[in-house]
Amino acid sequence: KKEIITLEDARVLAAKARQAVIDKLATAELKVPETSGEFERGWKRVRKDPGALHHFLSSIPPEKFPAFFRSGLEEELFVSLLETLSTTFLEKGQAQGAAGVLRGIATAPRLQMTLRFLDAKDKERLPAPVS
């Protein structure tokens, strides 16, 4: 006999299942990316979990970051990286790691353009020296 559930119960169940998948993907072992595509896919998997994002970014050798941003830097990724650097990295005393990521960001072509097109909400989220 099949159980009938309400639409609201189905939505709650779907939301829980979605969150379980997100949590599983975020904690799955990520390999160190070699290309900008691999970097972006890895970032998308962990971007909502500050601890996982910190682990992902700190596992990447600093000299690899410039290659990831060679073709530009999306606003959402840019803001996410700066937020992570200004919170998680600095809270853990990892200024060297933060500096490596910042050097990579600084090499992104059209970085000034990215900064210009940030909306007011994103500019508010930036650390003081950048905004």
Image (cartoon, rainbow, N blue to C red):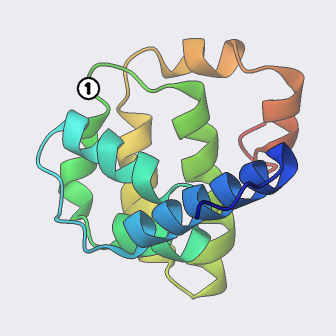
Task: Describe the element under mark 1 as helix, strand or loop.
Answer: loop
Residue 114 vertical position relative to residue 36 in the rendered view, above or below: above
Task: List the residue tagged with mark 1.
Answer: 70
In this picture, residue 2 sits left or right of residue 4: left
What residue is drawn where x is 31% and y is 73%? 28
In this picture, residue 73 sits left or right of residue 7: left
Query: Could you say where residue 94 lies in the image, as x and y percent from the top left?
Result: 49, 81
Q: Looking at this rendering, what residue extends furthest in the bottom direction?
A: 92
Residue 112 vertical position relative to residue 33 in the rendered view, above or below: above
Residue 9 vertical position relative to residue 66 in the rendered view, above or below: below
Q: Quadrant of the C terminus?
A: top right
Query: Could you say where residue 6 lies in the image, as x and y percent from the top left?
Result: 83, 50
How crowded is the residue under tag 1: few (<14 C-alpha within 10 Å), some, or many (20+)?
some
In front here: 82 or 52? Answer: 52
In this rendering, does residue 12 appear at all?
A: yes
Q: Quadrant of the N terminus?
A: bottom right
What residue is drawn where x is 88% and y is 39%? 124
Where is residue 68, by image quadrant? top left
In this picture, residue 29 sits left or right of residue 94: left
What residue is drawn where x is 73% and y is 51%? 10
In this rendering, does residue 97 appear at all?
A: no
In front here: 37 or 45? Answer: 45
What residue is drawn where x is 76% and y is 44%? 126
